[in-house]
Image (cartoon, rainbow, N blue to C red):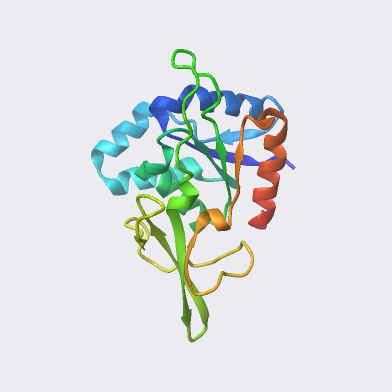
Amino acid sequence: MARRTFFSFHYKPDVQRAQIVKNSWVTREREDAGFFDSSAFEAAKRTNDDTLKAFLIREMHGSSVVCILVGKETAHRRWVRYEIQRGIWDERGILAVRIHTIRHFTDGVTTPGPNPLDLLGIHIKRTESGKSARFIERSSVIDGWSYSSDFGQVIPKWPYGALPSEGSHALSSIFPIYDWAADGFNQLGGWLDKAATQAGR
């Protein structure tokens, strides 16, 4: 089944690497999203946060999977984090793929960065009706968790199986990260299908 995929990445250093991943996907008669014009993104960002969030929601519309393309600095980008959380909020499949080994036209390969799914998580509390989940985040794996600054509400629905036990859980304990160097050209479709299936898509 064809999946419309939203690719989330750190634009300036990784757009050429991301383009290689995207091209491997769409040349197989599949649909992509998430390659919006950077000038449109910058214009929305200059207005205010709400305008930029509305812009990203429109760009993500219709996608069934959010694929985070992980380079050296991706994990610390606020709007990549927002796209991950928004993907969960909208019940999309979630996965990450390391792309630091893809050769940049001018800069070559780079070093691996942190997994964004290690720095984002959910906090589970028991309620009278069962359990509730809220987004949490941190700056590094040794820092403490705090509630997300962009999503202050309880997550309305959790389609990824049973909620974990009470307490804080990194998203990396729920969603996978792959490496493009592990034959990503041929494996990406299967990775995306697994993520969509996990979300019931």
The image quadrant of residue 173 is bottom right
Q: Decide which of 169, 78 is in the foreground and name it.
A: 169
Q: Is residue 31 left or right of residue 122?
A: right
Quadrant including the N terminus:
top right
Q: Position of residue 164 (x, y in %)?
A: 56, 69
Going by the picture, which residue comes out furthest to the top?
A: 106
Q: Decide which of 61, 142 is in the foreground and name it.
A: 142
Q: Residue at x 35, y 45 (%)?
A: 78
Q: Decide which of 142, 42 is in the foreground and name it.
A: 142
Q: Is residue 164 above or below residue 50?
A: below
Going by the picture, which residue comes out furthest to the left?
A: 47
Residue 87 in view, yes or no: yes
Q: Is residue 35 left or right of residue 175?
A: left
Q: Is residue 131 above or below residue 58?
A: below
Q: Position of residue 116 (x, y in %)?
A: 46, 46
Q: Position of residue 146 (x, y in %)?
A: 34, 62
Q: Position of residue 138 (x, y in %)?
A: 36, 54
Q: Residue at x 47, y 51 (%)?
A: 118
Q: Residue at x 48, y 80 (%)?
A: 126
Residue 63 in view, yes or no: no
